[in-house]
Amino acid sequence: MKTIHVLGSRQYGGADRFYVRLVEALNAAGHEALAVNRPGSPVARALAQRGLRQVALPFANKWDVTTTLRLARLVTRERPVAVQTYMGRATRLTRIPRRSAAVHVARLGGYYKIRGYYEHCDAWVGNTRGVCDYLVREGLPADRVFHVGNFVPEARAVDADELATLRVELSMPADALVLFTLGRFIDIKGFDDLLEAFALLPRAYAGRPLHLVIVGDGPLAASLRAVCERLDLTGRVHWPGWRDDPEPFFGLADVFVCPSRHETLGNVILEAWNHGLPVVSTTTPGALEIVTDGEDGLLCPVGDPRQLAARLRTMLELSARDRAALASAGGRTLRAAHGQEAVVADYLSLYDQLTRIGRRQRR
């Protein structure tokens, strides 16, 4: 059984990373998954590093007829059981030839515009139950909408020397108590709320200076740094920039913070649990679906720096043992609902089911 996985993104955000992880995991499980994506993109480089087979297509814009035709010929030649597309551009440009038995399944990780992008597909996968409910409300047939979650890769061990080098790079005290977050510097990530909350916290806990690390980059970089300066946080907030490998920062951190104003799922929460970190998050739809407040994380309202500061204060006032217990509970949640083996099995089961029910009959 073979599938083709199509992504037209230039970025390397959460959806792109999951695309790489899933293609790699499917192949490791003995299922042939062929990747189709932009040449020279971060995704293409990541797949090449893993030695995975891929095909480059331009995905120049949402009207790129050349990509549509070349992709159709690829489907005819490769004869997959399913073509799985990720996000709007790849989905819009994918048109399965009429004579092909391949099922077009779109994987959605957000509440995207359906009309003009997704309604021509044969089946749809939402990575949360909230997304699945949204797809049905938008008029897609409920019996063709499936819920399959995300998984995160095994955490890489980071040794003491690497962490010491990172502290020197950041000009951070060796005994710092570290809050950590990462993501694109865009409005919905709420990093300005986090800076406002951080300014309300004491400068130290239990004799350890409190520092904040924000890994990422994006259009709001300058304005976020301006907020940092206005709040007199310079020297206590660190901006390492975008990192393709953020693993060392998880190892450096004591607490992970997700201050987002909206997250459909929140892969970063899963990654934090995977690295054994306790989590403080806003009540985005994704966080509400995976975090139980007080059991495996702490939650606070969206867009409220004072409430975020209060929950961070609660977390920081816990003993190291109690913070570790929260992190362990998060790890159990991760393994039960978002383990790689379970998610890959769900996708393989879905492809098998789609081969039996076949393509959707459309008027």
Image (tube, helix red, strand yellow):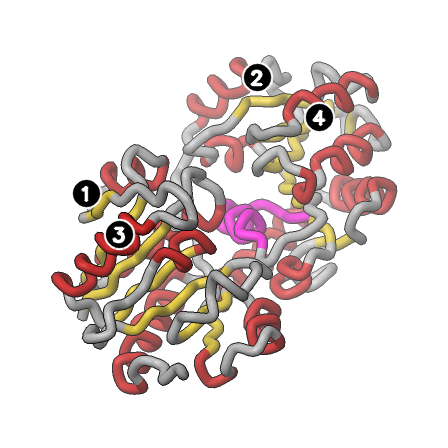
Q: Residue at x 73, y 27 (%)?
A: 210
Task: Report the front residue among 206 and 119.
Answer: 119
The label shown at residue 51 is: 1
Which mark is in front, 3 or 1?
Answer: 3
* Structural distance between the alpha carbons of marks 1 and 2: 33 Å
Residue to which mark 4 is pinned = 224
- SS assignment at label 3: strand
Task: Report the front residue among 113 and 281.
Answer: 113
Q: Amino acid at mark 2?
A: Leu
* Location of residue 237 with respect to 32 vertically, above or below: above
Task: Report the front residue among 254 and 311.
Answer: 311
Is the C-beta separation of discs 1 and 4 under 8 Å? no
Query: Horizontal and vertical percent for residue 363?
Result: 41, 83
Task: Report the front residue among 9 and 194.
Answer: 9
Magenta highlight range: 266-280
Look at the image and tell me whether residue 18 can be seen: no
* Structural distance between the alpha carbons of marks 4 and 3: 36 Å
Query: Horizontal and vertical percent for residue 45?
Result: 29, 35
Residue to which mark 3 is pinned = 35
Q: Is residue 358 magenta?
A: no
Q: Amino acid at mark 1?
A: Gly
Residue to which mark 2 is pinned = 170
Classed neighbour count for the residue bearing mark 4: other residues with Cα under 10 Å, few (<14), some (14–19), many (≥20):
some
